[in-house]
Image: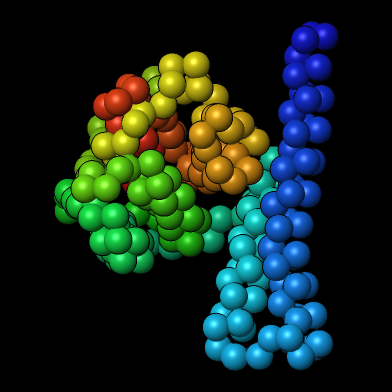
Amino acid sequence: MAERLQANDRQRRNMLADVSHELRTPLTVIQGNVEGILDGLYLADETRLKSILEETQVLSRLIEDLRTLALAESGALQLKREPTDLGELIRDTVAGFESQAKEKDINLDLSLNEIEEVNIDPQRVREVLTNLISNALRYTPIQGAVSISLAESDALTGEAVSKRGVVISIHDSGAGIETADLPHIFDRFYKSSDSGGMGLGLSIAKYLVEGHGGKIWAESEVSRGTKISFTLPV
């Protein structure tokens, strides 16, 4: 117990340091640009204003991630469910990454079975997809491949009683995840030595999937890529 308390305390201190760093960096850029414009050092042109806008978007994403995490952990996260075409949702989400994939010459492959509409919160499931696809592209080398699949599942992973659902998988051809890191990648604020950000994305994805009554898991081998899958009940 003492070891767990010490580990939690270290994690909390690291989290506060990470939050401070992640907030300070865009704020410093915004402040520097605005002060430069007011002092006449910079022109308030499109390039300068676009830079400021991009940093405010970084702040907005960070704050929204922290808010989602807080709501999920307190049990106050509300899902706005509606009948949704998952195939269309996946195609629309992937379309937003096409230019990024093209820059790295990464092949985006879709294998989407025809599935009846599912009763989900499309915005929250899009958040899960966005996080997983973004991670896959980040760790996939130039001329690599990322595949996204959708299929019907007879039973949700880990369920004793058979329950109809769907399974979505994102498989990359990246470097893979170290064996020691793999069991912890869905822990909040957990980061491997080569990861960026605050370690929130996969933790939030786990909360959102489980909030729908689904499961999420990862399979990976070093040098052989990573496959992250999640289920949603029909």
Front one among 219 and 165: 219
Measuring 76% from the left and 81% from the top, which residue is drawn there? Answer: 36
Residue at 77% over, 10% down:
3
Left or right of 118 on screen, residue 113: left
How far across and down, in percent of the image, does residue 77 sit?
A: 64, 51
Q: Is residue 212 visible?
A: yes
Find residue 8 and report its horizontal and vertical position in percent. 77, 23
| As drawn, 171 above or below 128 | above
Which residue is pictured at 27% across the width and 47% down the height?
142
Q: Give the x, y percent position of residue 201.
A: 55, 45
Residue most extreme to the front: 41
Relative to residue 93, is residue 201 depicted above or below?
above
Q: How is the image coloured?
A: rainbow
Which residue corresponds to the image point at 75% horizontal and 73% vertical from the top-left?
A: 32
Image quadrant where residue 78 sits = bottom right
Residue 232: quadrant of the picture: top left
Instruction: Judge by depth and name the residue closer to the eye, 47 or 168.
Output: 47
Quarter of the image for the N terminus: give it. top right
Residue 125 in the figure: left or right of residue 10: left
Q: Position of residue 87 (x, y in %)?
A: 26, 58
Picture layout, residue 207 above or below residue 128: above
Number of disc labels: 0
In this rendering, the answer to whether 216 lies above or below 120 is: above
Asked whether residue 117 appears in the rendered view, the answer is: no
